[in-house]
Image: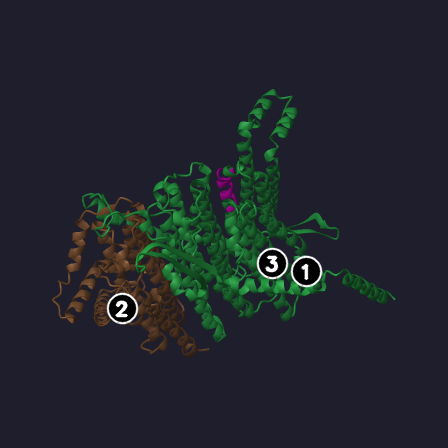
Amino acid sequence: MAWLLALLQTLLFIASAPLLAGWLKKVKCRLQNRRSPSIIQPYRDLRKLWRKEPIVAHSASWIFKATPYIVLSTTVLTASIVPLIAVNLPTAKIADVVVLIGFFALGRFFLALAGMDIGTAFGGMGSSREMTVSSLAEPAMLMAVFTLAMSASTTNLSEAMKYVLNTGLVLRPSFVFAMLGLMLVAVAETGRIPVDNPTTHLELTMIHEAMILEYSGRHLGLIEWASQIKLMIYGVLIVNIFFPWGIAQSFSLESLGIGAMSLLLKLIGLTVLLGLSEVVLAKMRVFRVQEYLSFAYLLTLLGMLSHIILEVQH
Amino acid sequence: MSLFFAYLSVVAALASGFLALATDKRSELDRLVRLLSQPWPKLQVRAEGIFSAAHYAEFHRNSLFILLGISGVSAVLAGGTALLSGVVTTDTLPFGLPWLNWHIRFDALSGFFYLLIGLSLIAVSLFGPGYVREFEHGKHSLAVLGLFTGFFVAGMELVLLADDAFFFVIAWELMSLSSYFLVAFQHEHASNRRAAFLYLLMAVVGAIAIILAYGVLASFSGGLTFDHFRSLKLTPVWSSVAFTLALIGFGMKAGLVPFHAWLPEAHPAAPSHVSALMSGVMLKIAVYGFIRFTFDLLDEVFWQWGLLALLLGTASAVLGILYAMQQQNLKRLLAYSSVENIGIIFIALGLALIFFSGGQPRLGTLGIVAALMHCLNHSLFKSLLFLGAGAILHNTHEQSMENMGGLIHRMPRLSGIFLIGCISISGLPPFNGFVSEWLIFQTALQTGNVDSGVIRSLIPTASAVLALTSALAAGCFVNVYGVAFLGLPRSRHVASCHEVSHRGMLAGPAMLAVLCVLFGIFPAPVIESLNVVTGQLVGNTLPQVSAMGWLWVSPVAQEVASYSPFLVLVGILLTVWLCYQLFYRQSGRLEARRADPWDCGFGGLNARMQYSCTGFAMPFRRIFQPVFDVEETIEEQKSGPDGFHTQRLRYQLRVSDRSWAFVYQPVARSVLNLSKWASRIQTGNIRTYIAYSFFTLIILLWGIS
């Protein structure tokens, strides 16, 4: 029963990821006084891409063709670990939050290799920049995770969420810092403004898009879907770790419904915030990203220190 | 039983070494065998076939490596039985000083490192015969290579067997000296001679520190055996002195920053299968020495030591990988990455020391287990990568990645094996490198149990650096694989190369790749068997590791953290299969169409337009600039009336290690100054020398009377 529920939750997770992307686009368009495409436009795009014939360069090896499947499956597996509308699911035990960071790294490793597989300058440039950004983002992310894990004394996501639920609404400075840091990291890792621009196609400014420039058709569809799921994973992580209230602790239909509704509200709030920041900010130069990420690291470090200084009782 | 295999392994390694002396003795052997086999005509025919000029070389080469293989297999058996049975065997050999015979002790810790030597040695002995073929007609005799390889392996194994300081140091020197000859094997290159000299120098300095460390223990205990040392109670000051000396001595051999400068010089200079042994195994012997000295011989540990080890480890990890990233020579890059991995191991050991001194033996045990796991994992994937680099070198005669590219199309099997090594070393799930890094993170996460606030905030910072390191390692090995194996070939000889023809040269690394995957997916049995090691060493185990079944790892407690790499792998494979079914099979098997890559409409893409490995590493070089010593020059040759037209452009980049300027050059300078100062007494004037003799005589006479 629990495993079935976990499977259903994962399916719900990956199926609703394009919806989140569509909603985000709608928010941004509204803020920019533009007419937005329909909220289900990402589904249409994905369907179109999946039906199209992929084109692969002559110099591509099996890595190029296998990467979309590997990237999608690691992302789906990550989604299965993250509690979406219910905690206590058995899949959360398979891997903890450190492994989750590892999964993202595995997907990124193959994506960066695929970028270099064709032997063009763009791919290599994208790979190099992506690895740079991620290597700076990872310590900040881990620091945020550490702050949480030291409070809850677990790295299991489900247990950590339960800990926050059980302690009730307490204002912890460490959590505030960790959340801000994690949000900055999430923006960098999902390739949003101001670190990267997912809609740009100006070659010299792109990071993620440069890496997947050679992908088309079915392959591109898989990668796009994977990055939509990744965006949703970061969103769910932020809202469910720091504001887990409403998440189902038992598997009754009623509590699951409450869990789904509360998650919906929380995600709507978060995407409005993200859309707002994307409209207000401009993309920054590649070599200013390090300052941005150092700031994220500093925030998480402050979170850690305030946890140690202010919150530990002996 | 385990001791028998351990001896067998040493004897086989020595036999392989002595057999190598027969390289150029074909005619003598031929005559001898004819003489001996005269009564049996059938045997004589066989022997003539083997000792004929055509077959002797191959027979001899193979038998060298078969002996090494036997040594490897028996080392694995020895280690396996010691780990499974948990029996400590001791012995005394009638060699050495008249009043001090060689004491032998083979416990689970020695057994674990024996296992580690054995696994790499088997792979090397499979790889070797194909690889050393090219040395046969070269300038240098195979005899030297074979002799010292055998001695080197035997030396490493004897270090593990030693149970008294005297024997330990002899075995240690055997290991160091024979590896010196291996580094100096291709001594026609000045750079190799320099590397070998530097290596010898550092080995000597390190050995002095180790001898002094044992000297401290020996002077207080009144004996040289480890049993004397174990029962010794030292004052904190003396025990800290001994620890510091041991850390310097073993750290020098292991390649800890700032003592690492010899390592990236020496490891690439040796033939590749020896580099694999040096980087994969010899560094671990130094780690063994450190563990034995600190956790076994010293009776008490202090948190300051842990902090020192943690700081050195963190610095080694992050600097090692940053320097690795800036290398173009593949073997040099791998050597620097060894510095990184040794750093990771010392981070775990530092954590262990801190927890032990803080009265948390269970967490300390977890730290030791994490360190030992990383030793095993690093020996597997680093040997794999060095052997892979050797295979590339063998087929393309190319060490610089800037001239490689597209090898995945030309060496499909080797590229698959090498990919597994790259994923493992980058610490990505579900392979083995990730397991040990995950264990270290789990150890670090238990900082809440430490009393001191300073340490509580330092450990998370160290683990953030560890996270940075593993992310940089992923970047570094994307660079390696992407530049060397993917893309288009960057030189003609790489474009025309093909798969390794010798089967053993693939089988060796392939075996290691299989082990990398296996230990990554089923880490729980390995950790379980490490319980025997920690039980004997520190009297503590991790009983809860496989509390959820042997497919799961839960190092601290079930609800704190759990990881099931097997289920992860099944999950990944299942989703890949499902995606493939859904999106390829169901979409009418739409095949991908091959076309030219996107060239912005200009056309004429060529291999030189690819990202180079220097280019790939450029953002890292720029972000972490203070770490490097960068010399960048651009020479322009201009022409035309106002010099607008650039005719030639020459770009030069040199990235060097800061440790030279900060540590080595000052030491070298002060030694030079000191000797200059001392040489003042040598005036070159005969009268002064006569005066010296006169005064010496007077002083002596005065002393006697």
Q: Is residue B124 magenta?
A: yes
Direction from residue A28 to residue B120 in the image, left or right: right
Colour green maps to chain: B
Give the image quarter of residue B554. Answer: bottom left
Q: Residue at x 56, y 34 (%)?
A: B60
In 3D space, how far apart are the residues under numbered discs 1 and 3 (Cα atoms)?
A: 23 Å
Residue A101, above or below A162: above
Colour brown maps to chain: A
Viewer-nearest of discs 1 and 2: 1
For the N terminus of chain A, the quadrant is bottom left
> What residue did someone put label 2 on?
A247
Query: What label sits on residue B228 in the rendered view?
Result: 1
Element at label 1:
helix
Q: What x and y, as percent, mark residue B206?
A: 60, 58
Tag 3 near tag 2, CB within 8 Å: no
Residue B491, above or below A243: above
Number of residues whose C-alpha sits closer than 10 Å to that of mark 1, classed few (under 14), some (14–19) or many (20 or more): some
Nearest the eye: A163 or B340: B340
Does residue B378 appear in this view? yes
Which chain letter goes with mark 2? A
Q: Amino acid at mark 2?
A: Ile
Nearest the eye: A151 or B380: B380
Number of residues whose C-alpha sits closer than 10 Å to that of mark 2, classed few (under 14), some (14–19) or many (20 or more): many
Query: What label sits on residue B206 in the rendered view?
Result: 3
Q: Residue at x 33, y 78 (%)?
A: A170
Question: What is the magenta segment's predominant secondary structure?
Answer: helix
Q: What x and y, as percent, mark residue B480?
A: 39, 52
Q: Which residues are magenta?
A: B119-132
Viewer-nearest of discs 1 and 3: 3
Direction from residue B221 to residue A292 in the image, left or right: left
